Amino acid sequence: MVTDKLMGFLDEEIAKLKSEGRFVKLRILEGPQEPVSIIDGKKVINLTSNNYLDLANHPALKKAAKAAIDKYGVGTAAVRTIIGTMDIHMALEKKLAEFKGTEAALVFQSGFTVNVACCQSLMTDEKDLLISDELNHASIIDGGRLSKASRKIYPHKDMKALKTILESSEAQGARRKMIVTDGVFSMDGDLAPLPQIVELAEKHGAFVMVDDAHASGVMGKNGRGTPSHFGLVDRVQIQIGTLSKAVAAIGGYVAGSKSLCDYLASVGRPFGFSSSHPPSVTATCIAALDILMNEPQRIEKLWSNARYFKEGLKRLGFDTGGSETPITPVMVGDTARAQKFSGRLFEEGVFALSICYPTVPRGKDRLRTIVSSGHTEKDLDFALEKFAKVGKELGIRE
Ligand SMILES: *Cc1c(COP(=O)(O)O)cnc(C)c1O
């Protein structure tokens, strides 16, 4: 249908997005998400998904999902607070709390919704102060916008700036102060300086929320996250995790005190106004957590693959930024070249998506790579060979 006159602005907006290289064309997976996948009809080494532990097509998870359908049906047809809570949802929350070493956990539809719920529900007054790293995830930014709090953004990992904010007169008069940070930053793969954040928070009477979307299943003992990695589980009040990345299903959760979870279950808007997970999703998460607990070798393989690939890229002369995790950016600098790099790699059989402005600051355009525990050394060597070839072709490395 031709866009009607009233809606003609859409075509203008789309033309603008296209001219800026910001129009999104969806790529289509044919078959499961795998370390080597069929994407847009082509078999490629997949360096773009968050399938860290190669669980997205794991037989035990699929079996658990199917069994849950037989036992519970396909959906809950209700929000959690009405009659959308099944015993299996409670079992997952109990397991998550045990896993995280917290009093309680509460599951939301996604990492996005749990971040929104926490920022919005905990920061409810103009006298509250939400303090956020400039590179925090979009869901934290949106959650902050939906909260009533005043907001302060500090430059990425700048602890001096955080200290100055905490010492400011606004902070002196604040009713509640919350410092929010990603545990692993999703575009750069670097870690939040949690020990310093926690220390400053304690000194200034602030509490800390860590979004461990990219750390869940990746960092800390058995993938428990960055507070576990830094030995700070008892000093971070609000731990956010996702079930959509390494855990390979969908969902997000908050882990912390029982009061925190009880409160959010009563007032968290996505919890009360959007329906709960199908039981098959919940069963998948439970099965994935069992694997995290029982197969630490998967996480070890993820990290050895990450080290191997990162070192290979560096050896080839690429700039991998400040990455400390399996997320490894390959810095390019300008949008057109980053997109060209990604396109040429795809033709060569390697899928690494370009990440451009405004997702990252101008001039920081890059390819972002994420290896999986399921990649073989042969897969990674193939990818490195293609990075070398195309990088040279485009003058991105010497
Ligand atoms: C992916 C991501 C989210 C959102 O998680 P979903 O479960 O996919 O909604 C939140 N925060 C960060 C840092 C992320 O990378």
Image (spheres, rainbow, N blue to C red):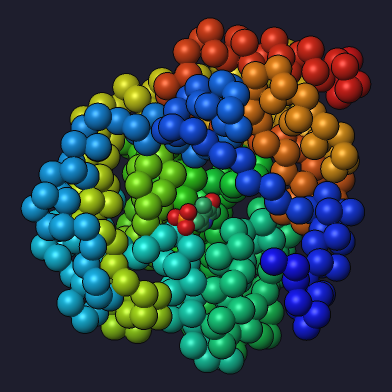
Looking at the rendered structure, the number of numbered marks drawn on it comes to 0
Which residue is painted at 91% across and 21% down in the image? 395
Res. 129 in view: no
Q: Viewed as shown, does residue 16 lie left or right of 24?
A: right
Q: Quadrant of residue 237?
A: bottom left
Quarter of the picture holding the C terminus? top right
Quarter of the picture holding the N terminus? bottom right
Q: Viewed as shown, does residue 94 lie left or right of 184?
A: left
Q: Nearer the viewer, residue 232 or 370?
A: 370
* 380 w.r.t. 325: above or below: above
Which residue is painted at 18% across and 36% down in the image? 63
Which residue is painted at 48% across and 80% down in the image? 120
Identify the residue at the far front of this view.
Answer: 1
Q: Position of residue 231 (x, y in %)?
A: 38, 45
Q: Which of 342 and 212 is in front in this view?
A: 342
Q: Where is residue 96 in the image (x, y as percent from the top left)?
A: 24, 53
Which residue is painted at 85% across and 68% down in the image? 12
Q: Position of residue 327 (x, y in %)?
A: 58, 35
* 68 w.r.t. 62: above or below: below
Q: Viewed as shown, does residue 160 lie left or right of 100?
A: right
Q: Nearer the viewer, residue 284 or 298?
A: 284
Q: Viewed as shown, does residue 372 lie left or right of 152?
A: left
